[in-house]
Image (spheres, rainbow, N blue to C red):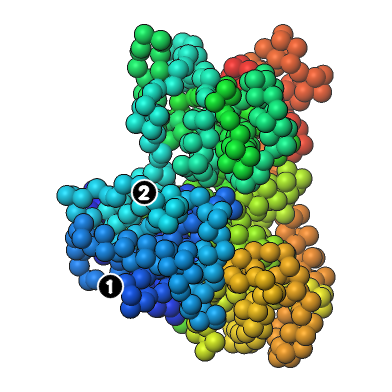
Amino acid sequence: MEETVEQFFHDFRQEMLAGAEANSTYQLEAFMEAVSTELVETGFVEGFEHCHYRAPRGMRVDGYWFNDEGVLDIFVADFDCRRELETLTRTDVEAAFKRVVNFFEASLQGALEPDVTTPEYGLVRQIADRRTTLRQVNFYLTSERVLSDRFQGLPDGEVGGVRATYHIWDMARFQRQRSSRGHKEPLDIDFVELFESGIACLPANLGSHSYPSYLIVMPAPILAKLYERYSARLLEQNVRTFLQARAQVNKGIRATILNEPQMFFAYNNGITATAQQVETRMTTAGLQIVRVTDLQIVNGGQTTASLFHTQRRDKADLSGIFVQMKLSVIDNDQSEMVVPRISEYANTQNRVNAADFFSNHPFHVRMAEFSRRIWAPAQQGAQRETKWFYERARGQYVDAQSKLTAGEQKRFRAEFSKTQMFTKTDLAKFENVFDDHPRWVNLGSQKNFARYALRIGKEWEKSSDGFNELYFRRVIARGILFRATEKLVSTQPWYNGGYRANIVAYTLSMLGEITKRRKMTVDCERIWAAQAVDDVVSQALVIIATAVNEDIIRPPQGISNISEWCKREGCWARLAQKADEVAELLPEEFWSGAVSSEDSRHEAKTARQTQKIDNGIEVQRQVFAVPSAHWSIILKEGTSRRLLSPKEMGILKIAEQMPARIPTEKQSAVLIEILDRAQQEGIV
């Protein structure tokens, strides 16, 4: 039975109230934390900074995020902790947007002078400092009410000479997003509406069972306009594309645009893209694409971004430039399997052998398997053990309960508490703050995850044995530390409601740096066993957080925005210099509870050896699951097609004789590789 908006509202409200209590935050802050997480996870925004400001002159702002391409996302909340779901009218919407627009205009004009210690001071100064480079401001209204059916939204416009868009996220829209079983709200691009014409194309799919596909010669001005309008949302299916394309201009592409635009089509490799749906029409000039649902550029992000930036920065004329595009139509159900392969095969230059870290990457699969199998010890005072639910694909936690009865759902939530659910972006935060990458965390969830993905993807290819049960328990312990630090920071007398994410990230990085310098490490196994942070570690965290706060609120001369300072390498470099000084402030009991780095390395080595054995057992299990007849077919066809080496033919002859003869672990690994090749060749 599908959840109603009213049910969603009440569940959302209870989750928000629980979050406010768990993190010792105000309800408004908990509401903005919940809704901004939804927007970041779904790719609508790259990140979020809390900033609650109200002025008697009809101004309000509740958060913001600057990206590195001249775009500001600015948020205003419609929130009063309502007990029942109410209607959001046109009058309410216009009044809310007017308040945040007033704030933005006043900031542009330099008419606001908030206290220098507050988050709004940094935002006001940054808007004023960037007024000449801001190309777009996106106003977001997040509401705990449901939008009236009589009102659809506000049209795009201009505020203070800056292009402005207006986005309303009410309870109904949040509910639709969650009920989509993890699929993000897709882009719906109407080319006729946007450009007054369709895009000429040639159908390229062959046979009735193949995916629909098209070859397109895309006019560069249209491609640049799409990037200007949708930016990161066009690139979210590809980790490397997301990282490389943002705000960077390929020098070779730029030179061709400026000096040899007529040769661009010949020099450029073109673009590989996917879509969920494509709508076409036949005209006198031939077939045209008129509408595309969920266009995603999986290869060619740098080409797209370079066209846009060269046009904007160098005033380049793109009218005579065209780009070849291969567009494949992949439905929602197949996208998780097919799109990563398209991305991997299309991206042959500087290849990262991590399948770009999609949710079906073996790393995520293994972490999810651990999370469903490993019981966490009962917390103090509790009788039953629980598990931590790793959501490797968005919506899995909700989806896992969708077909359960009321009683089964209650048992599920007792085993997997919502407070013990964590996502890929959570995992990346937990890990990166401890692994000397605090700046990445301050760059926002999406960029932080992308960096983590590339790093862990390379480590996995080198050896997957390090990602074992000990690693999983350490992840959870670090997550407990992360969330405990959030709560501790919120309760400090010096905390003014701003920069908590920055303080938490650098506090935990400083904790890691301090212990590392003394050849020690925090005892994650003890935190795992207690499922909590003890008073001694909590005291140490408060001492470190206080020192971090005092440092970051005093950025160097010439930098007015603390959040921007926290994104720079210099911030961590300056903090790291104070590690020894802060270490002297920690209680002796803290050091007696830490473990030596040598003991930690020995434990990790043992865990890797255990995982290696487990991996060997698993690969043998996979080989035994394949019928002997399949191995005979592969041997026969592979030999006739000259696809096999003499060594591989010998191993296949052993596999033919199972269970009389049993392949070794190494032979089993070779057999799995042969099986994969055989499937690609269509043999089995």
Which quarter of the rendered picture does the C terminus lie within? Answer: top right
- In the image, what residue occupies the spot 57% across and 47% down? 365
Crowd band around label 1 with a 10 angstrom C-alpha radius: few (<14), some (14–19), many (20+): few
Residue 539 falls in which quadrant of the image?
bottom right
Asked if the residues shown at circle 1 and circle 2 are in contact, with their CB atoms under 8 angstroms apart, the answer is no
The answer to which of 588 and 26 lies nearer the viewer is 26
Q: Position of residue 418 (x, y in %)?
A: 42, 64
Residue 267 vs 390, above or below: the answer is above
Relative to 418, residue 280 above or below: above
For numbered disc 1, what is the local secondary structure? loop
Give the labeled residue for mark 2.
157
Q: CA distance from mark 1 to mark 2?
A: 29 Å
Residue 632: % across, % down: 66, 17
Of residues 475 and 220, the one nearer the viewer is 220
List x then y, in percent, for residue 566.
64, 68
Q: Is residue 378 visible?
A: no
Q: Which mark is residue 396?
A: none
Determine which of the numbered discs, if any, sits on residue 80 in the image.
1
Q: Residue at x 66, y 75 (%)?
A: 555
Residue density around tag 2, few if under 14, some if 14–19, many if 20 or more, within 10 Å: few
Instruction: State the residue at coordinates (35%, 71%).
Output: 59
Q: Amino acid at mark 1?
A: Asp
Q: Nearer the viewer, residue 288 or 364?
A: 288
